Amino acid sequence: MSEDTNLKRREFIGNGAKLAAGLTIAPGVVVYGLSEASVPDRPAEEPASSERRWGMLVDSNKCATGCDKCVTACGEENGWDDSEPNSSPEQKAQWIRKVELRHKGTGKSHSLPMMCQHCENPPCVDVCPTNASMKRADGIVLVDRHRCIGCRYCMMACPYKARSFIHETLTDQEPHMPRGKGTVESCTMCVHRVDEGREPACVEECPEQAILFGDLNDPDSAIAQALTRYDSTAVREDLGLNPGVRYRGI
């Protein structure tokens, strides 16, 4: 192997290490690798841990038909609400959406938010050919946009239709949430807020407090205790994905 080839190889490995540690793609915009993600109440340099599993409990009895405050909050927080003005409604980004479920037998309906369910066994991760779809140790499912090639296999694999494809060049992005044309994206459970010890934007802005967020592995957490007191359902529980998002009242 030539000296020039060895030099290029060392440069490639060095650049890969920089990407894993954190890559600045624009002034004030840094993308961190999976290993660098921290968790609340721990030093910033400590990675996410499997000791915790973040999740949500949505009470559909409180979720009002016609209310989309959670959708608005997510769009404003992460910068996707009006990011593709020229796209058709079917092509617009939709990290979270409101859906109406109706029981075929009784006709009873429930309004509830639908987003990435942050599955324990995420099919989007299984089918991704570049490992761009990934799951953090604490259960949050993310997309590494540096690895995403836009094949959209993950979109086809997701039974919740929770992922969106970016069709247009984007401007005015949020510093904490860089996005790019030709890549796939979905709910991140506001990982940047979680790592600062805060709640996701949809949880914070829900006027009915219909969404409970917390550590599913902590028996003393409010969400874990609520799950022991109330019956809850996982959407498409038959698939055995063990989602981190559960619903009460459906």
Image (spheres, rainbow, N blue to C red):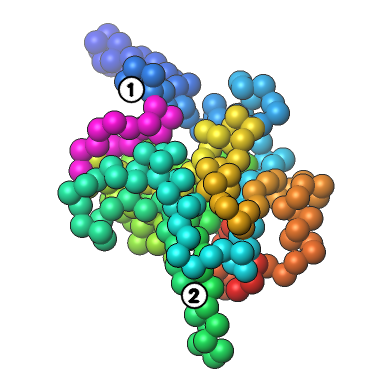
Is 15 included in the stretch rendered in magenta?
no
For this view, does 220 lie left or right of residue 54? Answer: right
Residue contact between numbered discs 1 and 2, judged by CB atoms under 8 Å: no
Which residue is pictured at 42% across the width and 18% down the height? 18
The residue shown at (41%, 23%) is 30
Task: Identify the residue position indicated by label 2 in the image.
Answer: 101
Q: Looking at this rendering, what residue extends furthest in the left direction?
A: 86
Q: Nearer the viewer, mark 1 or mark 2?
A: 2
For this view, does 162 lie left or right of residue 152? right
What range is drawn magenta here? 168-180
The reply to whether the magenta stretch includes residue 172 is yes
Residue drawn where x is 54% and y is 90% of the image: 105
Residue 212, percent from left and from top: 65, 52
For mark 1, does the 10 Å Cα neighbourhood hold few (<14), some (14 to 19), or many (20 or more) residues? few
Q: Nearer the viewer, residue 193 or 239?
A: 193
From mark 1 to mark 2, how far is it between C-alphas?
41 Å
Q: Nearer the viewer, residue 67 or 160?
A: 67
Question: As displayed, is residue 207 above or below residue 193?
Answer: below
Q: Which of the pair 85/29 is nearer the observer?
A: 85
Question: Residue 37 falls in which quadrant of the image?
Answer: top right
Label 1 or label 2, whichever comes before in sequence order: 1
Q: Is residue 53 above or below residue 123?
A: above
Residue, x 79% and y 55% (percent of image)?
225
Q: Position of residue 8 (x, y in %)?
A: 28, 15
The residue to which callout 1 is attached is 25
